[in-house]
Image (cartoon, helix red, strand yellow):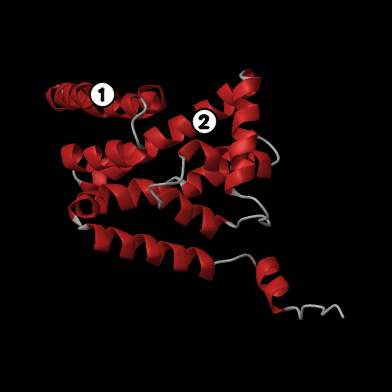
Amino acid sequence: MDELFNRALEVIEAAGWYAPVLFVLLHVLRPLLFLPVLLVTVAGGYVFGPIYGAIYSYIGLMGVSVSFYWIIGLMPKLHQKLARLKEKVFANRERMNTWQLLVLRVMPFMHFHVISFYVIEETRDFHHYVKKSAIINASPAVVYTAFGGLIHQLPLPGVLLLVGFLAILAFLVRTKNEQEQANEPQEKYL
């Protein structure tokens, strides 16, 4: 798989003016090739630089999100499988706000499509899904492109520190409802 990915990067680099189109296409095909978002987005920063790499990655991530919306409706078994996985990942959680979803999109261990599935179920229709996806897809496009090389070069303690920081950030941006529930006194049973 790494050889295929490296070959794809070589083709993109040699493609000239239509290289961005090939890169966006690589993003859209990424789930079929079982390539992680992090890898493709970091490659975008390497090939196109941080600004254009982030723009092209964002377009590619939006392409993946939009195609996922339509594909999930056509595949009931995949829909059921993702519903079970979503229940495991988001069990006992109230609705997540946009800030939490932004942070989760950047977490390398969170599956891209589980979050997309969550957004599908939390939005009313395609328009609202695209609107929310447009917001939350910005975080991996910018962070992975700009800091992707740094993340890969960090030693394990640095990566753990970064993940810990993101977890604390996710805790601090809890929904208002969760904060109110946390502040309510617990009833004691005698």
Q: Within 10 Å of the Cα at label 2, are there few (<14), some (14-19), or many (20+) other Cα atoms?
A: some
Place of residue 30 in the rendered image (x, y in percent of width and height, measured from the top left): 36, 27
**What is the spatial separation of the Cα atoms under label 2 and label 1, in whole angstroms?**
25 Å
Q: Quadrant of the C terminus?
A: bottom right
Q: Within 10 Å of the Cα at label 1, are there few (<14), some (14-19), or many (20+) other Cα atoms?
A: few
In-image side of 101 versus 188 (left or right) = left
Place of residue 108 in the rendered image (x, y in percent of width and height, measured from the top left): 38, 47
Q: How many marks?
A: 2
Label annotation for residue 1: 1
Place of residue 31 in the rendered image (x, y in percent of width and height, measured from the top left): 41, 27
Picture residue at 56% right of the left edge, 55% below the top: 98
Who is closer to the viewer here, 165 or 50?
Answer: 165
Residue 37, relative to residue 96: is it above or below? above
Picture residue at 17% right of the left edge, 27% below the top: 6
Who is closer to the viewer here, 149 or 17?
Answer: 149
Who is closer to the viewer here, 168 or 48?
Answer: 168
Q: Quadrant of the N terminus?
A: top left
**Secondary structure of residue under mark 2:** helix
Identify the image quadrant of residue 164: bottom left
Residue 90, relative to residue 117: is it above or below? below
- Kind of residue at disc 2: Val
Place of residue 74 in the rendered image (x, y in percent of width and height, measured from the top left): 62, 18
Instruction: List the single residue furthest toward the front.
Output: 190
Picture residue at 17% right of the left edge, 41% below the top: 46
In-image side of 152 versus 107 (left or right) = left
- Kind of residue at disc 1: Met
**Secondary structure of residue under mark 1:** loop
Label annotation for residue 66: 2
First reached walking from the N terminus: tag 2 or tag 1: 1
In-image side of 22 versus 112 (left or right) = left
